[in-house]
Image: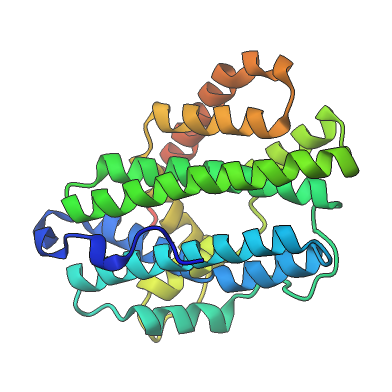
Amino acid sequence: MKPHWELNDLHWDQLIPAAVSPALLQTVKTAALIEANSGDYVSYLHNVFAGDDAFKAAADRWGDEEAQHGLALGRWAELVDPNFDFAQALARFRAGYRIPVDAAASVRGSRTGELVARCVVESGTCSFYSALRDAAPDPVLRDICHRIAQDEAQHFRLFKTHLERYQQREPLSTYARAKIALGRIFETSDDELSYAYFSANAPADARYDRVRFGTAYWRRAMSFYAQRHLQGAAHMVTVAIGSARLSRWTRPLGRLLWMATRWRLRRLEAQGAD
């Protein structure tokens, strides 16, 4: 199934390169690589959900839309920075970073757990692109990020539908779902974002340093958030956990995420990351 919007729907002639800050451009370049690399995640999900044709079809649709997000962001970045080669940066990223596509079972312990984690990821991307949209001075980027944020919200609902189905088959307790959700929010062991930042922004002769480039990425990305964006993510996370009793924790969780973001941003700024 084709995505419901195309690159030709965007008004590229309205782009204002001079309005774009280096931090925003570097963040978008990184995001373009992450989105465009969805094929590996589709392969992983096909393996984890072997035998479930309905979910595999949903994963294919999700992957196609994620790849289109990468193409839109990559094209925008090339127009803002003519020296940026999206295809080359993506090849560099794929050469140095891979997820375990051959895994036969979810790294979250069960299919239900995998879907909880997927919902958390979509809540995070929805809030991220909402933040970029609201911070962007360029109308074309605002449009792209608005479309992507809407897609990510729809992806959340897609994974949530399958989560409800698997919760009937392979139920997890509220505590187990909450543990997976919070663990995914604060997960820091993955090289994906730091390597994507490196691949998109570092000179060709640079050597990868996870701490250096991860710090550089997060210092930029976190600066675009407002509390309302994290409050929206908190709402989606509590919905994914699935207990009506948790609704009263939505606002405190949103405040916690906001405080954690501001605290981490202050630390990163104090470190003077490049």
Q: Foreground residue, 232 or 213?
A: 232
Residue 3, image quadrant: bottom left
In this rendering, position of residue 150 left or right of residue 99: left
Q: Is residue 232 above or below residue 105?
A: above
Q: Is residue 151 above or below residue 244?
A: below
Q: Foreground residue, 167 or 262?
A: 167
Whole-percent x and y of residue 199? Answer: 44, 75
In percent of the image, x 10 and y 58: which residue is there?
14
In percent of the image, x 73 and y 72: which residue is there?
100
In percent of the image, x 46 and y 66: which residue is there?
2
In this rendering, position of residue 109 left or right of residue 130: right
Whole-percent x and y of residue 98? Answer: 64, 75
Q: Is residue 87 above or below residue 48?
A: below
In this rendering, position of residue 140 left or right of residue 236: left
In this rendering, position of residue 38 left or right of residue 227: right
Q: Foreground residue, 268 or 128?
A: 128
Residue 82, image quadrant: bottom left
Q: Is residue 116 above or below residue 199?
A: above
Q: Residue furthest right?
A: 170
Whole-percent x and y of residue 67? Answer: 47, 68
In percent of the image, x 40 and y 86: which residue is there?
205
Image color mode: rainbow
Whole-percent x and y of residue 244? Answer: 71, 18
Residue 127 in view: yes
Residue 271 in view: no
Give the position of the C terminus as an image quadrant: bottom left
What is the count of numbered marks?
Answer: 0
